[in-house]
Amino acid sequence: FSCFSPTEEERNIRANDREYNLSYKYANNAIKTSKYNIFTFLPLNLFEQFQRLANAYFLFLLCLQLIPDISSLSWFTTVVPLVLVLAMTMAKDGSDDIVSDQKQLTMFTLYRLRSEKWMNVQVGDIIKLQNNQFVTADLLLLSSSEPLNLVYIETAELDGCVSVLPASEFDVCVCLCVYTCISFKDPLSLFALLLFSSSSETNLKVKQGLTVTGELEDSIEKLASFDGQVRCEPPNNRLDKFTGCLSLDGAMYSLDNEKILLRGCTLRNTQWCFGLVLFGGPDTKLMQNCGKTTFKRTSIDRLMNVLVLSIFGFLAIMCLILAIGNGIWEYQEGATFAAFLPKPEGVNPPFSAFLTFWSYVIILNTVVPISLYVSVEIIRLGNSFYIDWDRKMYYPKNDTPAQARTTTLNEELGQIKYIFSDKTGTLTQNIMTFNKCSINGKSYGGEQGVVDFSWNKLADPKFWFHDHSLVEVVRGGNPKAHDFFRLLALCHTVMPEEKKEGELYYQAQSPDEGALVTAARNFGFVFRSRTPESITVVEMGKLVTYELLAVLDFNNVRKRMSVIVRSPDGRLTLYCKGADTIIFERLHPSSKNVMEATTQHLNEYAGDGLRTLALAYKDIDLNYMEDWKKRHHEASTGMEQREEKLDALYEEIEKGLLLLGATAVEDKLQDGVPQTIEQLAKADIKIWVLTGDKQETAENIGYSCNMLREEMTEVFIVAGNTAEEVRAYALEKDMQKELLRTACMCQTVICCRVTPLQKAQVVELVKKYKQAITLAIGDGANDVSMIKAAHIGVGISGQEGMQAVLSSDYSFAQFRYLQRLLLVHGRWSYLRMCKFLRYFFYKNFTFTLVHFWYGFFCGFSAQTVYDEWFITLYNLVYTALPVLGLSLFDQDVNDRWSFQYPQLYAPGQLNQYFSKKAFIYTVLHSGYSSLVLFFIPWAAMYDTVRDDGKDIVDYQSFALLAQTCLLIAVNIQLGLDTYYWTAVNQFFLWGSLSVYFAVTFTMYSNGMFLIFTSSFPFIGAARNSLNQPNMWLTILITSILCVVPVVAYRFLRILLWPTINDKVSVNEKAVLPAAPRRIQPRRISTRRSGYAFSHAQGYGDLVTSGRFLRRTPRSRGIVFSHTDSPLAQAKPQLYRTIVEGEEPPQIP
């Protein structure tokens, strides 16, 4: 799969020749990150907002209200809510766009170099980078400050590897043919940089340019006269592959991925380098891999859209009924009122019914909630802040808080049915420790007591090992033990760093290699330094230099690595380490007994979930080695089938090996992972592990996490050894449903050796056929596609960089925080959103249906039953804050009980709190309440007089009574829906009622009538009506009749059909029982873990090339060091479980 333009088959570039390169119309380096600018913000934002059906509908209503024959309400009843909604949304959109477009560009001039923005860089320009600066575009490395064209880069933006991030300026230079340079900052990269943890440590990668271009050095004259021409592949998204050639001075040079610096990388430990721009802007591999980010919407959002359309239909039906009623009334009774209500000329009953239809569309518009979407966004924003502020999801060791990177998916966290998790770095810490080993058939490690390494002055003080006997064997001169650790000290691609005498730091390709070399170091075989031709080791205090003849590098097919060295006494030895199954196939028959004992040890190590490697060696004949080296040189310099020829030579020499033993490295689980998985399983959430590791490694982690258990006797393994078999199992459409059906029948699903694309395909498969809410969680760049594919993506900010975090919807530092995110924040968010929607529709339908019933008593004349100002302020002031208080603070049970009973999570998965069925119940409830709220006040006021007998009750008094009854009734309903009362809830509820009465008495006063006579016609209605006892009695009776059915239903439901929510809510104040102490049983298994290698090509070619050797020693930051396990200090939470029929603990 490739993203490049189909019209470009090959790219031709000339260095320092812009005119030639511009003729091909290659993309420049500009990338737009903002949606608006100062001129397009207002029109474009309004255009987007009016694409929402509700906003467009209210704009249409405003146009109708400008027609005098139709409008029965003043214009401000629609304009005020519409303007407020548009303004609030506009402010939010503008704020988000400003944050994403902080273009802080730095300009400077240095000698003949000039500064410029990234967007002005063109293909064919020569870029100058300095230490700790971002790579501007995809570059061909020309020259560097390091010996023989070496550069060190950090690839956090590409594959998740990060290193120490020193403070620096982010200026970058571009060298043009006229002795000018450009420097700049990239807003995207700068934003990503600010998210990095300053304390994170891991590995750098090395790139190496051609020797011929390295001669350019940093000479501006040489660089300006450089006229090389590059032919290469078109833009594509392959990060691990590049094909091209450089023509220079009549010679042709092959280009591969090791000579390319990709945009998104950061230059490290290198003073400067120069590169030729090959791809810019959208053509860079980073941007080609970004893919199209789809806007994620929740299931409630989609349901709301359906319901709003249904509401439009319901509104049309009501208006049609009232319009027909108007036509009938005009035909039968209209002539009676013609004397004092003369009809306009040409108006007959059908035309009057037509006008009445549109008049009622205006009056009944509140059934379509204009403020619904804004209220939903406010609620989501508030619940997002709760996640950001949650101290129980803060990881102090790395100073990493939880972060809600989106505000649109909170309630979806309470509906998760499937979780797709990465393994390394997500379930595990991705910090390797040398735990056990087997040497010549004897196992070491795991005993009590920490080994004292004070006898070794070069030992790493952070390294711990638990077996004193191994030290005694090594110090006693055991030859097999010495060969074992000698192999670990020689067979690797680690690069050493020694700031001070004796202070060694290792820069390793993977944490596994660093752990093994550190183990050899502490047991007396200290890897000290290396050159292109030699490796220097301190063996038991004696300095020994080995001649390095060849490195047979690791890759995913070989699953092993070998080195061939010559010792000072002239002995030629091949040392090999790799996966045990691979090494055992290549052993000499004489190693049979050692292999049997080692196999038993490997099974024991697998039972402990350790990652294992087998170690072997062989002596090589001198004459054979000379012949093999000639053939190796011919194969390595050939242009055709280079890899196949080298693999054949490696297979030839790596035979007849003698087994030394095996290593066992522990990738410890993160704290609380088994308990978290158990809690989520109790909540009926299915967890699938998708990992690139081999089957054995994934199985062992599955057992450690309690996902797999020994009593699971029926284990189904669906495996394929070829691309066709794998495609048949998973990718072909006719097999997808069968694969999914089989997987869903299993208690646990673990997918091994899957690529990033296959991870996304598994997620899409479940989304497509199961119609369930999915969540994907990972920590590396290989998890990005999975994170984007799921409904919700969660990034772990761990050892593998920030790429997963930058692509996620939520992020935190430890997997165990996932249970709090879902069982607490997710469940509360879902509960609050559902309560809000039910109540919001209830109060609006009740408000509107009173108008509908009143139409039958006012001759269908489109007269409003309420005061116009009450209609305007009902949703914006009188009922806005109380429902927001409910939606932001309510909780049925606290967080501790949410953990205690994970089954409380189930209603969200089943959509029990808000669905089409729940919406119909809400409408029926509103219909009943509206009948009570209209007919009880109407009956109470019909033909009555004041208690002094002076005045007959009028329309204004009836309107005041009806709206007062409505507001009090909906607030009582809100109180019944509130489980968790706070001071804020109380203030909003009573404050809203106080504001209502204050505004009512003010607007119905003589002063307002005298100032604005036409706008405030209800003069004196409040003071003349609300002082009557029968008014308050009517309000009391109406309120009681509205809530009695609700109270009765809830009482009977809790009494006869209690749910687990009801049980826990009633007994929430009970003392939680102490969690029983759990002892994790040791597992005995025959399954072995996988090889402890990175899944990337090694640095063997680089090590033997000599291009990493520095001219002068220079201080460098710690890139790899063995660190302590970052376990949190908090103890894992353990919880008991209950079933639906079990009674919660009673209050003593």
Image (cartoon, rainbow, N blue to C red):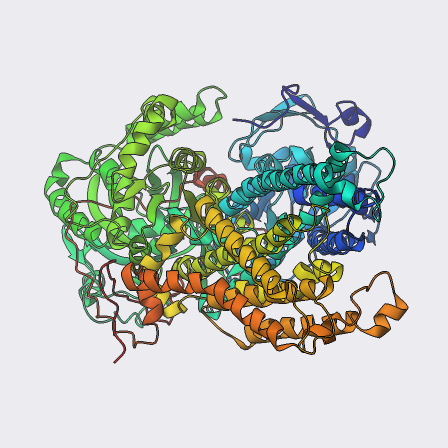
Which corner quadrant of the image does residue 1128 belong to?
Answer: bottom left
Residues 753 and 142: in front is: 753
Quadrant holding the C terminus = bottom left
Asked whether residue 401 is in view, the answer is: no
Residues 135 and 750: in front is: 750
Residue sticking out furthest to the left = 593
Q: Position of residue 576 (x, y in %)?
A: 29, 41
Residues 643 and 620: in front is: 643
Left or right for 935, reference 718: right
Q: Position of residue 372 (x, y in %)?
A: 62, 52
Which corner quadrant of the image does residue 1125 belong to?
Answer: bottom left
Q: Position of residue 96 (x, y in %)?
A: 68, 53
Residue 966 sits above or below residue 662 on the image? below
Left or right for 895, reference 941: left
How many numbered discs?
0
> At 72% across and 36% down in the image, what residue appears?
331
Left or right for 873, reference 1138: right
Residues 529 and 151: in front is: 151
Q: Position of residue 375 (x, y in %)?
A: 62, 57
